[in-house]
């Protein structure tokens, strides 16, 4: 079955430290991959997406993600976190892409920032 | 920047009552979606809608649920007879081609 795994439920990092959030997917072909962020009480904001081409993609707010086909992974990174990055981060895939395909979300990783 | 809007932000209802959640997608988008997130759980797909008909629906989307695009701008989700387990955050999303943009959500509380 198609699935998205985010193995870390909760991560705490110090402000200014680097960050990596893990995401693995299970699907036969290369899906379309996304990272969304949800701040408390807010909706889901798109951080970045990967469809094809360069496997390192840049997103908003200084985030980047790298697609690794051999590891079925799409990890999210940021070199230096800010207190405002505290939020819930969701990795997501569209497995069989057509224009109306559903998104399958991971269970999310909650990021806390230590002052 | 265009965005998806949803109303109300919070709806409280009694079990067995009908509720309608409203969404205004981004104006040039053609594909519309509803998702829900039960507290503490992952975001789950409910239904997708294109060209005035349902494209795909999940097992959650049973006969108690319906969607409609009553005019050129609104997209609604109706729950005919709410259950306690329908309490969740409901997100509307829309897309033009390949990326779904989400609204801020409606928190539905069923008492």
Image: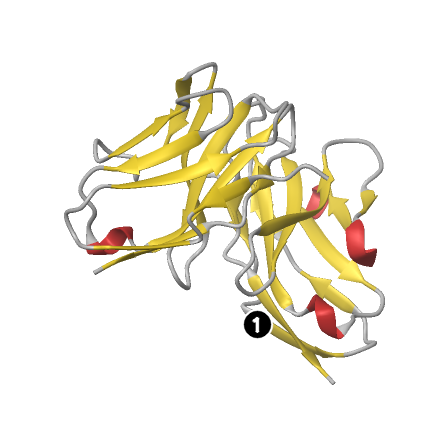
Badge 1: residue crowd in 10 Å (few <14, some 14–19, many ≥20): few
Q: Where is residue B47 in the image (x, y as percent from the top left)?
A: 40, 32
Q: Residue furthest left?
A: B16
Q: Quadrant of the N terminus of chain B?
A: top right
Picture residue at 42% right of the left edge, 64% below the top: B40
In screen coordinates, is A85 left or right of B30? Answer: right
Q: In which quarter of the image is residue B84?
A: bottom left
Please indicate whether residue A109 sits to the left or right of residue B58 in the image.
right
Residue A78 appears in view: yes
Residue indicated by mark 1 = A10
Q: Is mark 1 on a helix, strand or loop?
A: strand
Residue B104 screen position, x and y as percent: 53, 50
Q: Position of residue A71 (x, y in %)?
A: 68, 48
Q: Where is residue B18 in the image (x, y as percent from the top left)?
A: 21, 41
Which chain is disc 1 placed on?
Answer: A
* Location of the C terminus of chain B (image quadrant): bottom left
């Amino acid at each position: 079955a198609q699935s998205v795994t985010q193995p870390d439920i909760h991560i705490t990092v110090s402000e200014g430290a680097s960050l990596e959030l893990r995401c693995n997917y299970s699907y036969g072909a290369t899906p379309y991959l996304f990272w969304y962020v949800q701040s408390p009480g807010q909706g889901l904001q798109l951080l970045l997406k990967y469809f094809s081409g360069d496997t390192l993609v840049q997103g908003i707010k200084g985030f980047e993600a790298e697609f690794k086909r051999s590891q079925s992974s799409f990890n999210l990174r940021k070199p230096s976190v800010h207190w405002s990055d505290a939020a819930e981060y969701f990795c997501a895939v569209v497995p069989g892409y057509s224009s109306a395909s559903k998104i399958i979300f991971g269970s999310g990783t909650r990021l806390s920032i230590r002052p | 920047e265009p965005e998806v809007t949803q109303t109300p932000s919070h709806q409280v209802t009694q079990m067995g009552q009908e509720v309608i959640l409203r969404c205004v997608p981004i104006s040039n988008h053609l594909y519309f979606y509803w998702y829900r997130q039960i507290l503490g759980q992952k975001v789950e797909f409910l239904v997708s809608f294109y060209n005035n008909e349902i494209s795909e629906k999940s097992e959650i989307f049973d006969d108690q649920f319906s969607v409609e695009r009553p005019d050129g701008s609104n997209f609604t989700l109706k729950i005919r007879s709410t259950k306690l387990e329908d309490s969740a955050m409901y997100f509307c999303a829309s897309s033009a081609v390949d990326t779904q943009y989400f609204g801020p959500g409606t928190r539905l509380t069923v008492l």
